[in-house]
Image: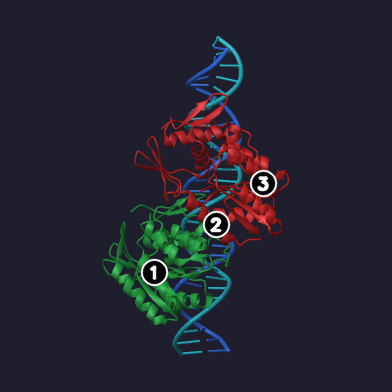
Chain colours: A red, B green, C cyan, D blue
Amino acid sequence: MRILLIEDDIVLGTAVRDQIAADGHSVDWVTRLDAAGDAMAVAAYDLLLLDLMLPDGRGIGFLKTIRNRGDVTPVIILTALDQISDRIEGLNAGADDYLVKPFDLSELTARIGSVARRYSGNPNPIITHGALDIDLASRSIHRNGKPVQLTAREWALFDAFLARPGQLLSKTQLEDKLYAHGAEIESNTIEVHVSRLRKKLGADVIQTERGMGYRLGPS
Amino acid sequence: MRILLIEDDIVLGTAVRDQIAADGHSVDWVTRLDAAGDAMAVAAYDLLLLDLMLPDGRGIGFLKTIRNRGDVTPVIILTALDQISDRIEGLNAGADDYLVKPFDLSELTARIGSVARRYSGNPNPIITHGALDIDLASRSIHRNGKPVQLTAREWALFDAFLARPGQLLSKTQLEDKLYAHGAEIESNTIEVHVSRLRKKLGADVIQTERGMGYRLGPS
DNA sequence: ACCAACCTGACAGGTTCCTGAAGCTCGCGG
DNA sequence: CCGCGAGCTTCAGGAACCTGTCAGGTTGGT
């Protein structure tokens, strides 16, 4: 499951991110609302964990915005005890659940699991894309029935495409997704990884849009 | 046999867990229904022990839910004497047996054995995986016909793989499974145990996905 | 034809993993 | 009370593999 964590507290954020990862989900962590917007433009998430007190704006407004846009991604609000009114407002604004800080990490796991179950019909969905059978949960891919091994980076990249099938993704967007902000890249790394993906998955899996970026090819 | 215990009373839960473990089964113990759902999503169980009075909902509803889902895992209900009506409702909802609190632990052992026997066509189901014959009930493994001895940790680890064949499991996930939360590990213990498992069971039994984790290899 | 953008084989440095061996804990028997 | 052994964890050196970089070739647009 793909989860976007929006939380500016480094300590809490780290703990939450590690817990989610330990549960076997993939996490992107941002500390600002504008970064959250960017992330959501690049990848589709199955769940948002939204802190209501952030440096660059009120989380409630952000939530209302994405709901107005027609986005129905499940949202769990993280809120402090003295923000009960916010919490109610949050549920009204379209949140699915809330957690009061400080919360137990197992509590978090439980809520995530519950939301996940509510929104995913079958437990192990297999995506078929052309000659590829992709099982996101177990992280395995078969090409014409034969298993294909992807490395961690290759998965991260392919995952970005799968999250937005058919959508054009610029190299900058992909870099942001692969390299947790700060570690800057100064070469054609994305091109190289795309090349490696094509070699493993087939040349037509990822299409080049000259000067603009890449997109997942049609199945 | 893998058993999931759903019980919020710490004293009773501890006693039951220890008894089951003493009987040679592996137990996971949760105190809430949503945690139970999560556990069942992560691992397959051979038996559920379900307390009907839990903090986050009625056990009956939970039971009905998993039955509606088509799950036929045997369920034994744990109920207090003054909840006879619940008990009847429970059997109607798809429970296989019940125990009235307070119950004798030997009684528990007997019921577990009975349910287990009733539901496993053959008394000792043997899983065949490549050159391995695995008898979960008696915790014995034969490799090419020759018996192989596993230590406690090795069993726990191998069990984690057997519960989710083919699924990628991160080292963190495996640590969480082997070391009841809290006892943190700070070294390459998992790697070492994987190494020992491979030596005993064959090099191809567990596959490494560099940077991501391990998975049970194909048979 | 020219130029920019892109592709891809090769390679080196770094990370991750493997594994033998040493240290540790705990229970048991003497 | 001490020694012993089995199993578990830690450590360390080396092997295996990943991945960012580069360079030379290819493609596509104008």
Q: Are marks 1 and 3 in contact (CB under 8 Å)?
A: no
Q: Residues within 10 Å of mark 3 (few under 14, many from 20)?
A: many
> Which residue is farthest front?
B85
Say what amino acid the circle numbered 1 marks: Glu
Which of A169 and B7 lies nearest the eye of the viewer? B7
Q: Where residue A17 sits in the image (x, y, percent)?
A: 60, 53
Identify the residue shown where x is 67% and y is 43%. A61
**Where in the figure is residue A1, as x and y percent of width and height?**
51, 48
Q: Disc number at residue A1?
A: none
State which tag comes first along the sequence, 3 or 2.
3
Quarter of the figure that contains the N terminus of chain B:
bottom left
Q: Which residue is mark 2?
A: A111
Q: Is A216 placed above or below A73 here?
A: above
Residue B124 position in % (x across, y down): 29, 69
- Image point (52%, 62%), residue name: B176
Mark 1 nearby-residue class (10 Å; few <14, some 14–19, many ≥20): few
Against A101, is A130 above or below?
Answer: above
What quarter of the picture does the C terminus of chain B occupy? bottom left
The residues bearing labels 3 and 2 have C-alpha atoms spaced at a distance of 20 Å
Give the residue at mark 1. Answer: B89
Tell which subunit mark 1 falls on.
Answer: B
Dot 2, how many residues are within 10 Å of its Cα: few (below 14), some (14-19), or many (20+)? some
**Closer to us: mark 2 or mark 1?**
1
Residue B95 lies in what quarter of the image?
A: bottom left
On residue A60, which mark appears?
Answer: 3
Secondary structure under the numbered disc 3 in the rendered image: helix
Host chain of mark 2: A
Mark 1 → mark 3, Cα distance in angstroms: 43 Å
Q: Does residue A28 appear left or right of residue B43 in this picture?
A: right
